[in-house]
Image (tube, coloured by chain):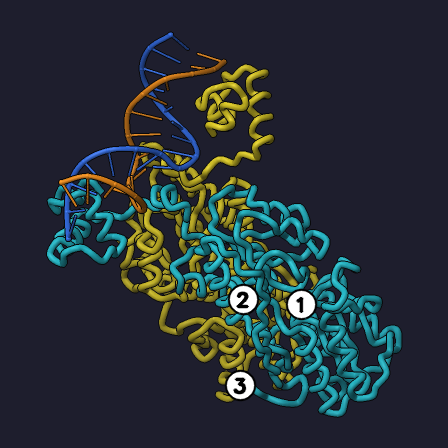
Chain colours: A yellow, B cyan, C orange, D blue
Amino acid sequence: MHDVARVAGVSIKTVSNVINDYPHVRPATRERVLAAISELDYRPNLAARGLRSGRSGVIGLAVPALRENYFAELADAVIRAAERRGLGVVVEQTSGERDAELLSVSGASRPRFLDGLLFSPVSLGQSDIDALQTPLPIVLLGERIFGGPTDHVAMHNTSAAQAAVEHLLGIGRRRIAIIGADPDADVGLDSPGEHTEVNSASLRLRGYRQALEGAGIEVDADLIRPSEHWNRAGGAQAVERMREAGVDFDAVFALNDTLGLGALRALGAAGVSVPDDVAVIGFDNIDESRYSVPSMSTVDTGRDEIAQTAVDLLLERINEKDSPVPPRTIKPDFRLIRRESTGFHDD
Amino acid sequence: MHDVARVAGVSIKTVSNVINDYPHVRPATRERVLAAISELDYRPNLAARGLRSGRSGVIGLAVPALRENYFAELADAVIRAAERRGLGVVVEQTSGERDAELLSVSGASRPRFLDGLLFSPVSLGQSDIDALQTPLPIVLLGERIFGGPTDHVAMHNTSAAQAAVEHLLGIGRRRIAIIGADPDADVGLDSPGEHTEVNSASLRLRGYRQALEGAGIEVDADLIRPSEHWNRAGGAQAVERMREAGVDFDAVFALNDTLGLGALRALGAAGVSVPDDVAVIGFDNIDESRYSVPSMSTVDTGRDEIAQTAVDLLLERINEKDSPVPPRTIKPDFRLIRRESTGFHDD
DNA sequence: CTGAAAGCGCTAACAC
DNA sequence: GTGTTAGCGCTTTCAG
């Protein structure tokens, strides 16, 4: 910087002004400085700038694991959104472990370095709400915690699930299995804190119940099938078990796409025709759901919008002086995607 | 830090010594300092440390896109490997675009902030070798560029591909299609620079040719099927086109797993039985290949080892004083994974 | 509009 | 073993 100042024949302060687009610099001076900068191939030292400004220009994204398609696509969207705002993204993987999640939130891993954190918890729940009370700006993603001290970008889990099930009802299905849900859990927004398990599963299960009730169909507990892991193996296993148990069903609502893809696999392996014998719909609209055999209907929960909104909320908090705006919760719109697995072909 | 020093009744330097595990600190003093640190919940400011040391403790990973399964899993592995070494990872997506790749390498995006970069180019090729000549330590991933000025972690493309095809030969297949390959390209390590297109495709195609030659089978150009994009849609389309063209084939070697999964989809949709009528093998061993219907044989190219090796090489370069060790190229071992799509069930 | 100087929090000489 | 001090490269009052 000194060198640039010398070459341009100005002071170091003027160089700084030019770099930071400070308005009151004479055009001629600015030109000279810019020329000197490119001549010397000068690049501002971000560490020093960070030291002064207290900003690094980097935010964190804490997710369970990138190998899970949903989170890979979320990370993809977040990185693009952050780039538009000139931010870098450090990705941390928590493996869904409680300790790793706490560590990530406490910022103890990379102390005072990130400007903010987008946090998608899996193990932390409603009772850990205090852990979010940190000096590090945090925006929460997902449905584990509501009413916390931070901004929150969630999705319309219940109504989106309801729409998915209504779609199955709309094509004449009546014995609709739901996989990935705990039969005993049905906790909604009304009573958080009571169970620790306010989560996507229970909210989506609620949508399932509402859709059936709306159609005057009784919920059959045999059709509510749990799966410990929300992945292909779990989805396949849930279907296999249900068939072994002799449960009759003509549709499957999978609580996420990978469960649904697993279900598709199990049905295919068993020679069950989709959608003729059993219709299948998933949740999330991961890329792959378009390319399965048959292509899988699903619900698009607005991942790109979630990402951009989350980044923007975080940036607001980072730049916030004081006057703390109360925590906000935002839920982007969802969209039903009809594909072959329910007898359509939206795309 | 001053506060800590005051509370502990020592000088700031001693605090620094404790934090940095400088050996010659009296245990009692160390205790007092540690107590003061935890009392004040002191965390070292990484920006300041970075300013002093010229290190940020953060490396970059530049990949085309996280939504591509292979790169998501690679990023997963890299982040884990980096964490073991106490490093954070900023993930950058280049979309496979030349400009974005150049920007990433030049470090112009986040100037002088990353300690090093793991770079997986797609558009840059052999002729861009000069772009890698930067002050920023870089470790190259993949097969676009060989003989550059940086360390390089590659894979045994040719011999792994050869093993895959030999596996198909071993189960009696003779009309083996290869999808994702350019029929005109067959450039190996011997003659880089001549074509810009030294890449995974040509190296794997070479393995294909070698396997067939070894079995005394002539290569049939009709069986070499290109695909612009290495994704499911491309794989499906390649198979459809081949069938429309009336090409006879009893096996498919897909140049990556997503192509293979697409091929599986197209074969399934056409009512062709896998592996009875057509056997399929992929390349990469992404998680999903285990869960397709049928599960897909593939080649595991040692992703975890690639990640750890790359991080360690980069770290060596970052810590390197001068005495520049000449560029190294390392290729982890590969492993053939036999699954249902070739009539086995390794796992 | 531009310059001089202080200081962000830390580490590394070097002295004690 | 421990304290003092000088910067790392930048931004930011405050003068001019």
**Residue position for label 2:** B73
Badge 1 amino acid: Tyr
The answer to which image quadrant residue C13 occupies is top left
* Residue nearest the observer in this picture, A89 or B343: A89
Work out how far the residue at label 3 is from the one at label 2, CA to CA, in angstroms. 33 Å
Please say if D9 is above or below A6: below
Tell whether label 3 touches label 1 (CB within 8 Å): no
The answer to which image quadrant residue B209 occupies is bottom right
Q: Residue at x 46, y 54 (%)?
A: B318
Label 1 marks a residue whose chain is: A
Work out how far the residue at label 1 is from the one at label 3, CA to CA, in angstroms. 25 Å
Badge 2 amino acid: Glu
Label 3 marks a residue whose chain is: A
**Residue position for label 3:** A243
Please say if B207 is above or below A8: below
Mark drawn on residue A245: none
Tag in front: 3 or 2: 2
**Residue position for label 1:** A291
Q: Along the polypeptide, which appears first: circle 1 or circle 3?
A: 3
